[in-house]
Amino acid sequence: MIEENVNKLLESIPKTNPFCEKVTLVAAVKLQSPEDINRAVCAGIRDIGDNHVQEFKDKYDLITGNPVRHFIGHLQTNKVKYLLGKVDLYHSLDRYSLAEELSKRGEKAGVVSEALIQINIGNEESKSGFALSEADEAYAVIKAMPAIKIRGLMAMLPDVDDIDELTRLAKLMRAKYDELKAADPDLSYLSMGMSGDYELCIECGSNMIRLGTAIFGKRVYPKSN
Ligand SMILES: *Cc1c(COP(=O)(O)O)cnc(C)c1O
């Protein structure tokens, strides 16, 4: 199943977006067992992204094949210390206090962390991130932090069916990315697109997608008690 899904995706996902940029597929591995993650990696997945620090820690030594490690979930400031030096790209710098902690700890440890600034493009209460109107300031403030290298922007589109609205929001993200990138050659990634909307996102200029369900099937959430 997983192997089949990965094979199909690797064949069907466009190699490049309309801006001629390579599209990177990150497997969203929350709640997946190390065995299933390793199957996906073995089938050709090169990048994996975690949401939960505890899961990341528990599984860290059990993942084979040396994939690129992403952290894509909301990150509590007091848990940064467990990830420092082990994550290749943080997708979810969604507030200043998190960026400050990451930079402060990185400075002490001699680790520069690569990260994306998360934008709450739909202005949704349920999602974190800077408003699009705050993106320039967030970029400038975090850019000045010594132990963070900003590599781009990340967003989650709202879970709605209105294609025109999704397209409008995705294009706003691409426009902001282009604007920032014009003055900063370190910017390489616009991380946008999940199982339900990745085709639209690539078409609008995303170059990094995060897929969970499309690879592993529907997630089984543990009962809360
Ligand atoms: C779970 C998750 C994904 C993947 O979602 P699917 O709809 O299962 O593809 C992508 N990005 C983030 C931040 C996630 O938490």
Image: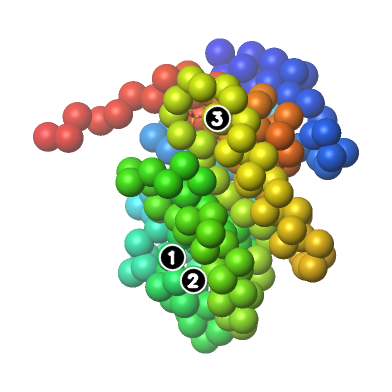
Answer yes or no: do the residues labelled 1 and 2 have beta carbons within 8 Å?
A: yes
Please indicate, yes or no, whether residue 78 appears anywhere in the rendered image. Answer: yes
Give me the residue at 45% from left, 25% from top: 160
Q: Nearer the viewer, mark 1 or mark 2?
A: 1
> Which label is found at residue 121?
none
Question: Looking at mark 3, is its residue's CB closer than 8 Å to ligand 1?
Answer: no
Q: CA distance from mark 2 to mark 3?
A: 30 Å
Spot occupied by residue 219 in the image (x, y as percentages of width and height): 39, 25
Q: Nearer the viewer, mark 3 or mark 1?
A: 3
Spot occupied by residue 203 in the image (x, y as percentages of width and height): 73, 29
Residue with the mark numbered 3: 165
Vertical arrangement, residue 118 with respect to residue 22, above or below: below
User: Helix, strand, or loop for circle 2?
Assistant: helix
* Badge 3: residue crowd in 10 Å (few <14, some 14–19, many ≥20): some
Answer yes or no: do the residues labelled 2 and 3 have beta carbons within 8 Å?
A: no
| Residue kind at label 2, given as amino acid type | Ala
Residue with the mark numbered 1: 95
Give me the residue at 67% from left, 24% from top: 199
